[in-house]
Image (cartoon, helix red, strand yellow):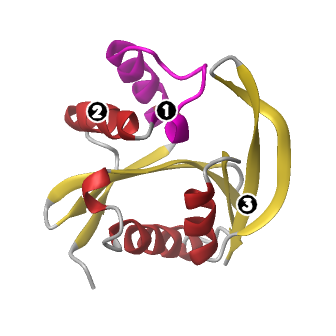
Amino acid sequence: MLDIELQSPFPTEHYGLLWKWMAEYPANNSDDFSPKTYVGFQVDMDLRQEREDVFLVLYEGKPVGAIGYTPMTPHAGMMHGILFSKSVHGKGVAKQAMQMFMAKVFASGVAKISASYYEHNKRVGRFLESLGFKVEGLMINQTIQDSKPINMVLAAAFA
């Protein structure tokens, strides 16, 4: 087991790290509606934390990622962001952190966790599949990226 800890709420002093991690793979993390400035991002994160559970992921005591989740009902919820620093990609950190997160959510009585991702982001699709997520459908022209409509894949994991 890796030395991983989940911390919620996401500390505001680490918003800058989150902004930096998003910029490592912008096509996988942002659409035309995403905040364009750091100040806009801070406002967006403050609003998100009022209605979502946003977790900071610590690896060996250092911030390396974030997991966002929105409870929809006592039965189901929706992921709203899985983001990890490029520095830990391929080390198993994201997978273990997500397994810890999913175990926590399922232990609370939630039976279904949904996630959506840009169709072109095959890596995230494989990652979610490795966690037991099953594709439920394709959302056609769900959002806009670089002024073009793009599809999103909807997937879910079950307790």
- Amino acid, disc 3: Ala
- Callout 1 crowding tier (Cα within 10 Å): few <14, some 14–19, many ≥20: some
Q: Main secondary structure of the magenta part?
A: helix
Judging from the image, what secondary structure is the residue with disc 2 in? helix
- Amino acid, disc 1: Arg
Q: How much space separates mark 3 and mark 1, taking CA atoms? A: 22 Å
Q: Earlier in the sequence, mark 3 or mark 1?
A: 1
Q: Earlier in the sequence, mark 3 or mark 2?
A: 2
What residue does disc 2 label?
A: 15
Q: State which mark lies toward you, 3 or 1.
A: 3
Instruction: Name the residue: 28% across, 61% down.
Output: 88
Residue 111 in sight from this viewpoint: no
Residue stretch in magenta: 26-49
Residue 34 in sight from this viewpoint: yes
- Amino acid, disc 2: Tyr
* Quarter of the figure that contains the C terminus: bottom right
Residue 4 appears in which quarter of the rendering? Answer: bottom left
What residue does disc 1 label?
A: 48
Q: State which mark lies toward you, 2 or 1.
A: 2
What residue does disc 3 label?
A: 155
